[in-house]
Image (cartoon, rainbow, N blue to C red):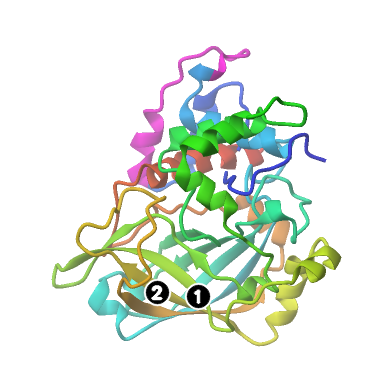
Amino acid sequence: MHSARPFQAAVGGGAFPAARAALALALSAIPATLVTFLAAIPVAFAADSPPADQKPLPVALVNALNTLAGGPHAGFRANHAKGVLVTGTFTPAKTAPSFSSAPHFAKAVPVLVRFSDTTGVPTIPDASPDASPHGMAIRFKLPEGGSTDIVSISANGFPVGTPEDFLALLTAISKSGPGVPKPTPVEQFLGTHPAALKFVSTPKPPPQSFGTLAFFGVNAFKFTNAKGVSHFARYQILPVAGEHALTAAEAAKADPNYLIDELPKRLASPVKFRLVAQVAKEGDVTNDATAVWPPDREIVELGVISLTATEKEQAKEQKALLYNPLSLTSGIEASADPILAARPPAYAVSFAQRAGQ
């Protein structure tokens, strides 16, 4: 059991004797463009019990997530610990090449997808409110070798706009257990951060299936076509079967592993998602994950993800797999969103943790 009730918004893991060693272990799994950035993270503390405020931000974020999950849990991610890996194919739409010159928008490619529950608790019940937002991470295996990833959640937008605020939110949650005088630290945080308050108060009913849940890339990217025309956009991954949730009564009776167990059965027929891009208009904020764009923005069809099988060695494959939203390819560039920039180094720390370092 975890010692503190996880928070619905929590996303990411671990404590290490030396942050430099932990990050070094993960560098081999990170694209070369990130190595310089990761190596530059300061390590301004001794190996024995360093003050919390001296830990590099990626380590502090992972430690905070572990605290909320009662972890670290050996061999598991610090966040989205419980998941299932499936394989399939991405087939680009006719409109995709005119939007971006990315190679997988011109030719069908294999995909490796991981669906997951939020929190670092490996045994969290799938229907628990704390298991949402769920995650969908997608790896596209590119035609000429290499890969590119999408990391998404089943919520349109993020509770905070900076990694510093995310750490402050996680810290406030950890200090707001039973018996804490009101207003608790998390209540005070939500009172001064309207986007976080909206995020946690928006209903997130448990889905009937991972295959009936919509996912959103909360960070913007710059897409450029072969003619040099660029647009900022965010990914949406929409279930072809439609969005369907459990009723409260159904959720109360749901098996703890109903999502994990149901998906292989559903894969008797392909489980399909439309990958689309919601395109920003001039003036739309592209560097803040809390700034959700209006629904009237242009939608460009990028293609269809068709999932057909589960990976055979789930535990082994999941432990070794590191998704990275900044593992990009030609035709796609990162925005200046600080939450996006913070993800890979935190993921690297979590990766090192589950590798046993």
Residue 233 percent location from the top left of the image: 31, 64
Task: Determine which quarter of the picture holds residue 51.
Answer: top right
Residue 36 in magenta stretch? yes
The disc placed on residue 203 is: none
Q: Is residue 328 visible?
A: yes
What residue is rendered at 62% in x and 61% in y? 204
Q: Earlier in the sequence, mark 2 or mark 1?
A: 1
What residue is rendered at 83% in x and 41% in y? 1
**Which residues make up the magenta segment?**
32-52
What residue is rendered at 65% in x and 41% in y? 354
Q: Nearer the viewer, residue 35 or 306?
A: 306
Q: In this picture, is 83 found above or below 73?
A: below
Residue 206 percent location from the top left of the image: 69, 65
Check disc 1: other Cα within 10 Å, few if <14, some if 14-19, many if 20+. Answer: many
- Per the image, label 1 sits on a secondary structure element best described as strand
Check disc 2: other Cα within 10 Å, few if <14, some if 14-19, many if 20+. Answer: many
Q: Which residue is mark 2?
A: 276
Q: Is residue 31 left or right of residue 350?
A: left
Q: Is residue 29 visible?
A: no
Task: Determine which quarter of the picture holds residue 83.
Answer: bottom right
Q: Is residue 3 left or right of residue 50?
A: right
Q: Which residue is mark 1?
A: 238
Quadrant, the C terminus:
top right
Task: Determine which quarter of the picture holds residue 37.
Answer: top left
Q: Nearer the viewer, residue 13 or 186?
A: 186
Q: Say whether marks 2 and 1 touch (CB < 8 Å).
A: yes
Residue 202 percent location from the top left of the image: 57, 57
